[in-house]
Amino acid sequence: MSHLLKLMQVLILSVALLGVAASGMAGQQYLFKVASLAPEGSVWIKRFREFAQEVQEKTNGEVEFKIYAGGVMGDDLAMYRKMKVGQLNGGGFTMTGIGSVAPDFRVLGIPFLLRSYEEVDLLKKGLLPHFTRDFADSGMELIALTEVGFIYTMSTMPISTVEELKKGACWVPDNDPLSAGFLETLGMSPTPLTIPDVLTSLQTGLVNTVFNSFYGSIVLQWFTKARYITDMPFGYAYGAFLLDRKQFARLPPAYGELIKSTADKHFGLLLADTRQSNEEARAVLQENGVTLVKTDPNALAELEATRDRTVMKFKGKAFSEEIYEETMRLLDQFRKQK
């Protein structure tokens, strides 16, 4: 009887020790340090935090995301370099910033190419496999596409004609050969700057004409200086949520699938958030004294002709001929059906 009692005590102690060991192993096993230029409090960071919280809960705390918002880790290329040396494990990248790493990602940013969100959604879906392969070749796992939205010409002076645009001291995103090439084809000499440098440059007068979405101009405070917005989209801006591919591959397959399915959910909501925020921001800007300037009826035809000349110069350089031809095939097919 005493032998049986001792055996039971050993079993109880063993179970207790196993419980202690299990509790010691619980918690964070996979940490992803992720950076973004998006400001704290913006819809982009809000949705990302909700995505990260759900992943953490569904993995019992084993997968965790730490986000550095507001450009504290530098611009897109600085973030990418930090990924390469392991200081970061991912980021929310802009189209222009990450385009120097995966050039074909620039294709939807061709000025005056897209006319509606219907076209945007069609092309994103059709080109997603191509983008996924390109990022994989650069060591990155594409988790989700993000969106800034249609961007507009914003200036300290009203711009309604191409000639008025040419008189501006224009900003272009650093490492954006398409926008720079477009403006140069118009006969301008744009000033390349990183996004964090734009507001200061507007304040000092280094530039007086910039490009952003309605919502972006509010969260970055550019509207406080650029008080005139040309009421015709200049182009479309988007981005990508990317993780280091080696780090992602260390996850158990179920966790990798969970991250992607949860990202589909939350970044799908983010897409709707962004579009609604842009719509609401248009009214907010007007309420705060920003003037929407109507364009000259002939301006669009001249700008589209400039776009075509720009594409001829940069096709095969800024992006591949393959991605451009596929983009135009999908777009032409859609427009014929419409």
Image: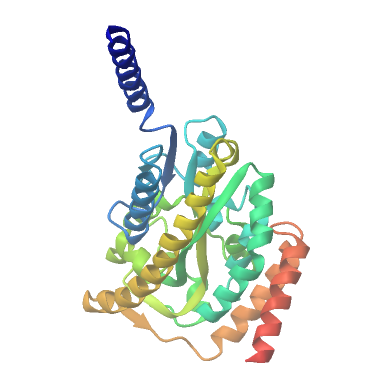
In the picture, measured across the screen, residue 105 lies left or right of residue 221, that is right
Depth check: give the residue in front, 13 or 71: 13
Where is residue 186? Give x, y as percent: 61, 71
Q: How is the image coloured?
A: rainbow
Q: Quadrant of the C terminus?
A: bottom right
Residue shown at the point (54%, 39%) measured from the top left: 252
Where is residue 205? Give x, y as percent: 36, 57
- The residue at the far top in this view is 2
Q: Is residue 153 above or below residue 132?
A: below
Q: Is residue 39 above or below residue 281?
A: above
Residue shown at the point (65%, 66%) measured from the top left: 127
Residue shown at the point (69%, 77%) measured from the top left: 330
Q: Is residue 2 above or below residue 194?
A: above
Residue shown at the point (27%, 7%) measured from the top left: 2
In the picture, measured across the screen, residue 331 lies left or right of residue 251, that is right
Depth check: give the residue in front, 183 or 113: 113
Does residue 112 appear in this view?
no
Q: Quadrant of residue 123?
A: bottom right
In the picture, measured across the screen, residue 313 lies left or right of residue 67, that is right
Does residue 117 appear in this view?
yes
Count of all numbered marks drawn on residues in the image: 0
Depth check: give the residue in front, 197 or 61: 61
Q: Quadrant of residue 278?
A: bottom left
Q: Is residue 48 above or below residue 328?
A: above
Q: Quadrant of residue 212?
A: bottom left
Q: Quadrant of the N terminus?
A: top left
Where is residue 120? Give x, y as percent: 56, 74
Where is residue 71? Give x, y as percent: 39, 45
